[in-house]
Amino acid sequence: MKKVLAVLLAATMLFGMASCSSGNGNSSEAGSSAGSSAESGESIPESSSGDVKIKVTTSANSGRPGLEAVAPLFEEETGIAVEAGFADLGTSTFTAELMTQLQAGSAPDIFTAYVGTGTSSPNIGTLASEGYLMDLSDTDYGKSVVGSAVEDCVSVDGKVYSALFGLQFCCIIYNEDLFEQYSLTPASTWEELIALIGKIREVAPDKIPIAFGGGNTSIAMIVASMFACNQPDYTGDEESFADSQVWKDGLNMIQELIDAGAYNTSASTDGSNEIVSQMTAGDAFMVIDCSSRYTAIKKADPECPVNISVFPARDTKDTKIMLWPGTNLNVNANAANPEECLEFISYVTGSEGSSAWLEAAGGSEISVAQLSDTETWPEHFSQLETYADTVTMIPVVNWPSSGSANALGEGIAGMLAGVKSVDNVLADMDANWGK
């Protein structure tokens, strides 16, 4: 794992060089394209001198604060206006709308998607293969990622298509006040986590031990991958699942949580909005998720007393911190103003733009450079520092297509609803490999 950090640090040095040279979802949060509603299409205040406008859509949760911070800075420096849109990435609504817009030629100039080839739809593998993304290989940013640890996340067939400038930790987010009220301690082992769920059910039967967004395919897929990554024989190179002890044991641990009463009865259909509502209302003690959920909770209620702890493996020596590629932006191959779009990408991947974006994100993401320097981690990541040498990228990034990832996310929802077994999910993942 130290080798991983070394390579990531080398990648960061390249990013710095580029910066210097470049001057389902049933969730009610689901947003639509830029300009379509007050929630999902609010424009960043435009200067009267802006003759050119670009439309940029990012995640309503993790991306919104960053875009709202960076857009006016970019406009002030360049005179290029930004119309901002926000969407619930990971829901079928967003995927369907984006694909419809791309086919009709009405999609945003710059938009977010999942990096890699095997992540949930829409991902850059699918979008690039269909000709919807601009090749960024010849940009300073594109040249900087070649040979780095994040190259596989942002490239398809040797060409760079996505600008990635933030990484998230996968972890447990918990309500400190609830833990204090009931004299509870965050679990550092799997046995402690199971016991903790039982204790919560005993002392607070009307509350939810662990919130879960099973109605969002990407959330379910990411969380399930965390269980697999914490298995002793995990390599990340698995290409079949029904005969994989790693994935079987990982999903069996999810079933253990289900059987222990960890989740709400609506967990199979809840989305990101429901998670945030349950946590801010004090209805849920914990959520296992990406660190972007921490920021979403704090944005909804800045006073919500949440903190972050490690998600433990069955055997603590196998505990790892799984990374999720965070903030990324992709340029529409048919953008009306391609040069201005590339100028925006140059700005947000440069030192000034990326720093402003990540700072506004409220600590949900860190830069690649920070991975090897725990002293620069935000305070709420302090309980993860012991595991800094264990970081591993989510495996689905390098799967050949989104079929298995989607089957995994949908399968977890089925397990939560009691209509799918572990074997069913693994078989579905195999059946959808490469599709």
Image: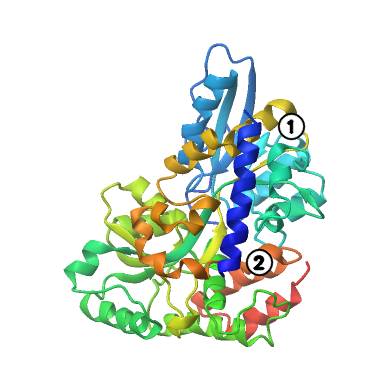
Taking the image as shown, residue 410 lies to the left or right of residue 387, namely: right
Mark 2, residues whose alpha carbon is within 10 Å: few (<14), some, or many (≥20)?
A: many
Q: Mark 2 = which residue? A: 396
Could you say which is closer to the camera, residue 372 or residue 226?
372
Is residue 114 shown above or below 45?
Answer: below
- Where residue 239 sits: x, y (%)? 73, 77
- Where residue 132 sits: x, y (%)? 77, 43
- Where residue 434 sits: x, y (%)? 78, 68
Amino acid bearing label 1: Ala
> Mark 1: which secondary structure?
loop
Closer to the chain start, of discs 2 and 1, is 1
Mark 1, residues whose alpha carbon is within 10 Å: few (<14), some, or many (≥20)?
A: many
> Mark 2: which secondary structure?
helix
Q: Mark 1 = which residue? A: 335
Q: Residue at x 47, y 36 (%)?
A: 356
Can you say which quadrant of the picture contains the N terminus? bottom right
Q: Residue at x 31, y 84 (%)?
A: 195
Q: Residue at x 59, y 41 (%)?
A: 16
Q: Is residue 393 visible?
A: no
Amino acid bearing label 2: Val
Residue 262, quarter of the rendered image = bottom left
Q: Residue at x 28, y 70 (%)?
A: 207
